[in-house]
Image (cartoon, rainbow, N blue to C red):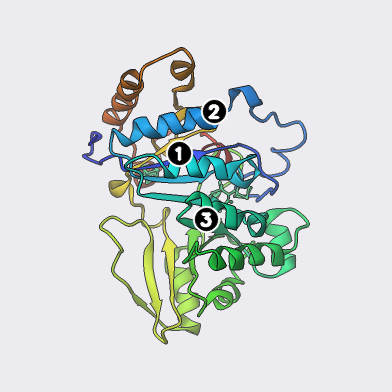
Amino acid sequence: MLFDTLRRPLRDLRVSVTDRCNFRCAYCMPRDVFDRNHVFLPREQILTFEEIERLVTVFTGLGVEKIRLTGGEPLLRHGIAELVERIASVERITDVAMTTNGSTLARHAAALADAGLDRVTVSLDAVDDARFRHAADIDFPVARVLEGIDEAKRVGLSPVKINTVVRKGLNEDALVDIAGMFRGTGHIVRFIEFMDVGSSNAWDLSEVVSAAEILSTIGAKWPLDPVEPNYPGEVVNRWRYRDGAGEIGVIASVTMPFCGECTRLRLSADGSIYTCLFAYAGTDLRDALREGATDTQIAEIVTDVWEARTDRYSEERVGVPIGLPKVEMSYIGG
Ligand code: SAM
Ligand code: SF4
Ligand code: SF4
């Protein structure tokens, strides 16, 4: 097992399979930045499924057991179920999950489950069309995302987790509606504080709705009790409805950072690894892969990166050199 300078082990890997997305959530891919002139990664720079599978296998030798596929929008990647199947069959991988905007989940869920996907998280910031349209900055019916969630449940990808980013002026007045939609369904809504990832979302602390505010809004309608974490170091803070209608979570990366528990590595669609969501530089593995490096040589690069790791951005919020743009969320996938 690998440990970094703060004794954090490497356990899980997020794999971004594309930097493209059909939505334009303003906190992630604001339309004025990600417009038709934006240059996305050319196909030849994107890792093939074989390359991803090989890297996943190398990572398992270093302690990785859990994989989450993300993007951009992972369901836009052609043949994604085949990638799930390849990853799920890697020895020592115990859990394969995906984070998606759910826009085409109804169509893909059965194939993903058959391919070995264990769990799915669907991002959803509103449950009414007007707010949803505003949040995703696209004319798309929220009902299609809800159908995707139903289908995921039907094929056994449950409990489905729903990720809701809470941002002032966007949806802070809709939290009860969102919680209410999923109470009693077995799905788990996780409310996420708006984070200062990337360099294009015009983040401002005044637009963060704290986990404490979120919990007091929902708790005022339906009283909540705290729940023990599923495992030590779980980043989600769990709460249960006192009336037995299920649970919710809050991810308080701004007001209660959890860097001490951060065991995640991120692999971008073009094959660079990043040790922090707020990084401004990564380490390329693709050239080594394509130039014939052995598994041992690739493992050495990763080992050097992880062992040198000092990141605790959310605990410091000062660590990024001024003028260096942080990497975008749509590129490393959260
Ligand atoms: N497109 C997929 C989706 O939206 O689920 C996967 C990629 S998306 C970058 C991964 C997660 O990051 C989503 O749940 C999204 O809500 C979250 N996210 C993006 N920008 C964020 C921000 N500025 N603050 C908090 N969460 C953010
Ligand atoms: Fe696309 Fe997901 Fe980013 Fe929204 S959060 S723009 S759905 S990548
Ligand atoms: Fe991990 Fe970086 Fe987030 Fe801290 S700020 S929890 S080190 S990704």
Which of labels 1 and 3 is toward the front? 3
Residue 22 x %, y %: 70, 46
Which is nearer the N-term, disc 3 or disc 2?
2
Q: Nearer the viewer, residue 84 or 331?
A: 84
Which residue, given by chain and number where applicable, does mark 2 sit on? Answer: 47
Which is nearer the N-term, disc 1 or disc 3?
3
Which residue, given by chain and number where applicable, does mark 1 sit on? Answer: 278
Residue 247 x %, y %: 42, 74
Which of labels 1 and 2 is toward the front? 2
**192 versus 75 height, above or below:** below
Image quadrant where residue 311 sits: top left
Q: Residue reaching furthest top?
A: 291
Mark 2, residues whose alpha carbon is within 10 Å: few (<14), some, or many (≥20)?
many
Q: Is mark 1 within 8 Å of ligand 3?
A: yes
Residue 117 x %, y %: 48, 52
Q: Secondary structure at mark 1?
A: loop
**4 versus 192 height, above or below:** above
